[in-house]
Image (spheres, helix red, strand yellow):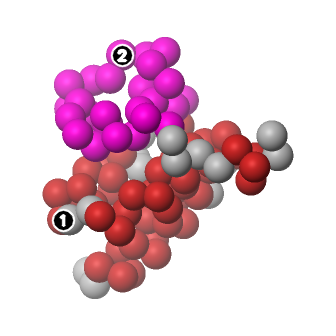
């Protein structure tokens, strides 16, 4: 599949998760970081989109241990949380 189409699909999936908090966290991560991703990072993020929001958010916040399969540079970057636009959230 064409990279641009994949990115459009991922942007939608990342920012339409079902809760505002997940949309800001997961969508914000995608928006802030996707331009620097290569194929391995895209594959990782595509797979992450199949996980439950409560798990993804728990891993990012450190309230749930990150399973071994998700550990690594992408999760470390995700856990920095510096990509969340607080003004956009209304705070």
Closer to the camera, 87 or 49? 87
Quadrant containing the C terminus is top right
**What residue sits 29% from the left and 79% below the top?**
3
Q: Which residue in the protein does label 2 denote?
A: 65
Relative to residue 63, is residue 20 depicted above or below? Answer: below
Q: Earlier in the sequence, mark 2 or mark 1?
A: 1
In this view of the protein, can residue 90 be seen by the observer? yes
Q: Main secondary structure of the magenta part?
A: helix
What secondary structure is found at the residue carrying circle 1? helix
Whether residues under marks 2 and 1 lie with C-beta atoms below 8 angstroms apart, the answer is no
Q: What percent of the width, then of the height, locates residue 77?
A: 34, 40
Q: Position of residue 1 (x, y in %)?
A: 26, 80
Q: Which residue sits at x=35%, y=68%?
A: 35
Write down the quadrant of residue 20 in the picture: top right
Magenta segment boundaries in residue numbering: 54-81
Helix, strand or loop for disc 2: loop
* Residue that badge 1 annotates: 39
């Amino acid at each position: 599949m064409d990279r641009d189409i994949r990115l459009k699909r991922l942007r939608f999936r990342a920012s339409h998760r079902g809760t505002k908090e997940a949309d800001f966290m997961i969508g914000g991560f995608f928006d802030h970081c996707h331009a620097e991703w290569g194929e391995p990072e895209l594959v990782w993020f595509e797979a992450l989109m199949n996980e439950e929001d409560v798990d993804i958010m728990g891993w990012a916040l450190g309230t749930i241990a990150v399973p071994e399969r998700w550990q690594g540079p992408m999760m470390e970057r995700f856990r920095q949380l510096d990509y969340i636009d607080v003004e956009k959230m209304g705070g």
